[in-house]
Image (cartoon, rainbow, N blue to C red):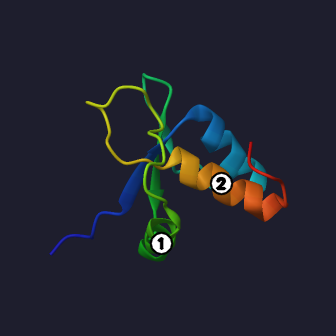
C-alpha cells in the first residue's frame, strides 16, 4: 500500500502570504502556486481537522472560479489570523 495523500486546501495569494507572516519557525515551501494566482497548500490531518472545526457557514471562496474549487478556506484562515494577532475583523 502506498503513502496516504495529504489533505490540500486552496487559498488566495493574500492568505498564503498571511500564513507565512504568522509562521514562528522557518517554513518549508510545500505549497504550489496555481496559474490563477491561488495556492494549493498540503495539510497534516490534525491541522485539517482543526480548520474544519473553525469554519463558519457561508465563508467565501478563496478563488472566484467556482468550477476550480468549492471549499471556503480564505475567510476562515483570515479570521483565525486576525484572532491570533489580536486584531478586530473588518
Judge whether 15 appears above or below 34 on screen: below
- Disc marking residue 25: none
The residue depicted at 42 percent of the width and 26 percent of the height is: 64
Q: Residue 36, relative to residue 48: is it above or below?
A: above
Looking at the image, how many numbered discs can be counted on the residues? 2
Q: Residue furthest right?
A: 86
Relative horizontal placement of residue 65, taking residue 62 as reference (left or right): left
Residue 10 spot, x, y in % from top left:
44, 44
At x 46% / y 69%, what residue is drawn?
44
Residue drawn at 68 percent across, 40 percent down = 17
The image shows residue 56, relative to residue 2, as above or below, that is above
Choose between 16 and 78: the one closer to the eye.
78
Can residue 78 be seen from the camera position used here?
yes
In the displayed structure, does residue 70 sit left or right of residue 35? left
> In the image as oriented, which residue stretches furthest toward the left?
1
Q: Where is residue 6 in the image (x, y as percent from the top left)?
A: 36, 63
Q: Quarter of the image containing the N terminus?
A: bottom left
Give coordinates of residue 30: x percent, y percent.
Answer: 52, 51
Residue 84 position in % (x across, y down): 77, 64
Q: Disc 2 and disc 1: Cα gap in Å? A: 13 Å
Q: Local crowd at mark 1 within 10 Å, few (<14), some, or many (≥20)? A: few
Say whether residue 25 is visible. Answer: no
Query: In terms of sequence position, does the residue under pointer 2 or pointer 1 come before the other?
Result: 1
Q: Which of 77 and 59 is in front in this view?
A: 59
Crowdedness of circle 2 by 10 Å Cα count: few (<14), some, many (20+)?
A: some
Q: Name the residue under label 2.
A: 79
Location of mark 1 (residue): 53
Element under disc 2: helix
Q: In which quarter of the image is the C terminus?
A: top right
Q: Residue furthest top?
A: 35
- Towards the viewer: 16 or 64: 64
Amino acid at each position: 500500500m502506498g503513502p496516504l495523500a495529504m489533505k490540500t486546501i486552496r487559498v488566495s495569494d493574500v492568505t498564503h502570504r498571511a500564513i507565512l507572516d504568522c509562521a514562528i519557525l522557518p517554513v518549508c515551501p510545500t505549497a504550489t502556486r496555481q496559474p490563477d494566482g491561488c495556492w494549493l497548500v498540503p495539510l497534516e490531518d490534525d491541522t485539517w481537522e482543526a480548520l474544519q472545526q473553525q469554519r463558519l457557514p457561508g465563508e467565501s471562496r478563496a478563488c472566484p472560479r467556482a468550477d476550480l474549487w468549492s471549499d471556503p478556506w480564505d475567510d476562515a484562515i483570515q479570521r483565525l489570523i486576525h484572532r491570533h494577532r489580536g486584531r478586530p475583523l473588518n
